[in-house]
């Protein structure tokens, strides 16, 4: 099995950058970061998109800071997926 050490190093760098920002992460971001951290802790587990996902999460935190948005006070989005199949207007 071949491991891309440059990719793995980038993933660990991003995880290190995100670690002190845990309180600023939204619940879904926190879950994703923890999931990816657990995945890369296993030998040979580095998908090409892990770094991209972590970069997006880090960017989102920085964007929220620029808009003075607090993840703790921002209510989670709720998407209503009730079916409208068969209903008539």
Image (cartoon, grey):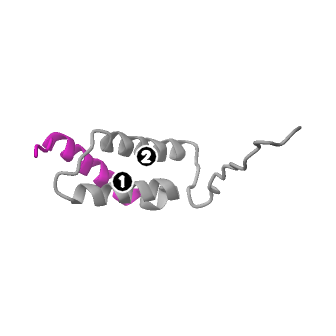
How far apart are the two marked residues, 1 and 2, measured between alpha carbons? 8 Å
Query: Which residue, as the protein is rendered here, is positioned at the far left?
Result: 1
Give me the residue at 62% from left, 55% from top: 74
Give me the residue at 87% from left, 39% from top: 88
- Residue 57 is left or right of residue 77, and the answer is left
SS for tag 1?
helix
Give me the residue at 47% from left, 47% from top: 61
- Residue 56 is left or right of residue 5, and the answer is right
- Residue 71 is left or right of residue 14, and the answer is right
Q: Is residue 44 above or below residue 2?
A: below
Would you call the spot at circle 2 few (<14 residues within 10 Å), some (14-19), or many (20 or more)? many
SS for tag 2?
helix
Give me the residue at 64% from left, 51% from top: 77
Pair 1/2: label in front: 2
- Residue 11 is left or right of residue 34, and the answer is left
Q: Which residue is mark 1?
A: 18
Q: Is residue 3 magenta?
A: yes
Would you call the spot at circle 1 few (<14 residues within 10 Å), some (14-19), or many (20 or more)? many
Q: Which residue is mark 2?
A: 57
Q: Are marks 1 and 2 in contact (CB under 8 Å)?
A: yes
Residue 46 placement (x, y as % from top left): 23, 47
Q: Which residues are magenta?
A: 1-21
């Amino acid at each position: 099995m071949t491991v891309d050490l440059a990719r793995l190093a980038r993933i660990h760098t991003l995880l290190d950058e995100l670690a002190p920002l845990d309180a600023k992460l939204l619940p879904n971001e926190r879950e994703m970061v923890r999931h990816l951290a657990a995945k890369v802790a296993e030998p040979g587990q580095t998908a090409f998109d892990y770094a991209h996902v972590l970069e997006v999460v880090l960017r989102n935190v920085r964007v929220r800071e620029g808009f003075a948005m607090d993840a703790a006070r921002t209510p989670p989005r709720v998407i209503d997926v009730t079916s409208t199949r068969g209903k008539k207007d």
